[in-house]
Image (cartoon, grey):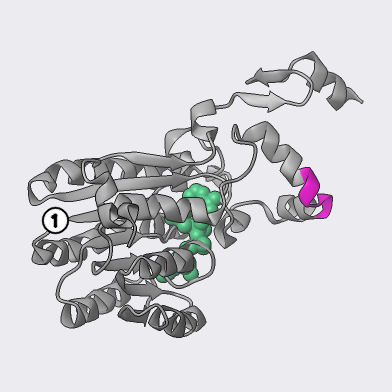
Amino acid sequence: MGLLEAQAALAGKTAIVVGGCGEIQGRAITLALARAGVHVAACDKHADAVEAIGPEVAALGVRLLAQHADAAEPDQLDAFYDRVAAEFGAADILVNVVGEVERNLFTATTRARNARDIRLNYGYVIDSCRRAIPLLQASGNGGSIINFTTIEAHRGAATYAVYAGAKAAVTNFSRALAVELGGAKIRVNCIAPDTSPARMSNAGLYPQDFERMTALGPDVLDEALKIYVPLKEAPPVEAIVDGVLFLASDLSRFVTGQTLHIDGGTSAALGFLDWPVDSFMPAPLAGAMARLKG
Ligand SMILES: NC(=O)c1ccc[n+]([C@@H]2O[C@H](COP(=O)([O-])OP(=O)(O)OC[C@H]3O[C@@H](n4cnc5c(N)ncnc54)[C@H](O)[C@@H]3O)[C@@H](O)[C@H]2O)c1
């Protein structure tokens, strides 16, 4: 084991990952934790993904409890936690990955859809923390809770108002919990992505916009991201996973109540774009306006 791995002290710990088997972020987080020697209890709403991840984690030589559960359903989340408590008895790390967005003008939303958005972006996080904290306390070594928020919790995200509000609630819930649990050495932090690959970020666009973007091709998307992202590309899934490993590990042992923005700098830019002709400005100047006219 290298010095960095030794300082991270992840090997032998146990993690709970809510939304930890499906494609992209959830699956990548579970596999990265397993590669670091962490035993994992993961639930996911995609039954095929729950089945498929078993042999992959087993090959890494750590324990896995994988259960089919929809985080939107309190009974299913409770059943998952009942099994984690019975089979693991204690845990060191909790990662709440699940989050869902559907783009819509607020005036076009329904009460049912808004209730679902609040449940899937905030409500289940509260329930998951409530069930996980006794398990973290049972480890006797403190712990680390990592909640997924979004850049939209930090700006006025028109057409994502309910999602933005629910994620902002997670941000401040996490901050308050960090203070409350400090004496137990349980740290609570958030990760706020922006444009990372995910099924959900595609679902978060209007279908016609997604189709038009796809038709324009990956080169045009790359050029557009150079305007928007200060680091000139969308953070890959691995960048998000590295953030999870950092916050889960002893490398961040004095970090609590914080949000890690893994977004290539978009939250720092806060609207300053790198226009092709005009360079950095929040609003387009003559060069970009001439292009629009042309
Ligand atoms: N990808 C981005 O650009 C981006 C941007 C901002 C915020 N986020 C946040 O990051 C988190 C991950 O989202 P993503 O779309 O990037 O990841 P994803 O779709 O790659 O991962 C989400 C995981 O949760 C599982 N899942 C989804 N709904 C579930 C449910 N109801 N019950 C149980 N499991 C469920 C999926 O199978 C998957 O494993 C979310 O909280 C999201 O709000 C992502």
Q: Name which quarter of the figure residue 200 lies in.
A: bottom right
**Is 248 on the left or on the right of 131, as rendered?**
right
Range shown magenta: 215-220
Depth check, front residue: 167 or 97? 97
Answer yes or no: is residue 199 visible.
Answer: yes
Give the mark count. 1
Residue visible at 35% across and 65% down in the picture: 36
**Is 260 on the left or on the right of 289, as rendered?**
left
Residue visible at 33% across and 79% down in the picture: 64
Point out the residue furthest to the top here. 286
Residue visible at 15% across and 71% down in the picture: 90
Residue under label 1, please give it: 142
Depth check, front residue: 166 or 91? 91
Taking the magenta stretch, the answer to whether it contains residue 94 is no
**Residue 254 location in percent, x, y?**
21, 41
**Residue 225 location in percent, x, y?**
68, 39
**Residue 241 location in percent, x, y?**
44, 56
Answer yes or no: is residue 19 visible.
Answer: no
**Residue 61 location in percent, x, y?**
35, 80
**Is 215 on the left or on the right of 294, as rendered?**
left
Q: Mark 1: which secondary structure? A: loop
- Give the quadrant of the N terminus: bottom left
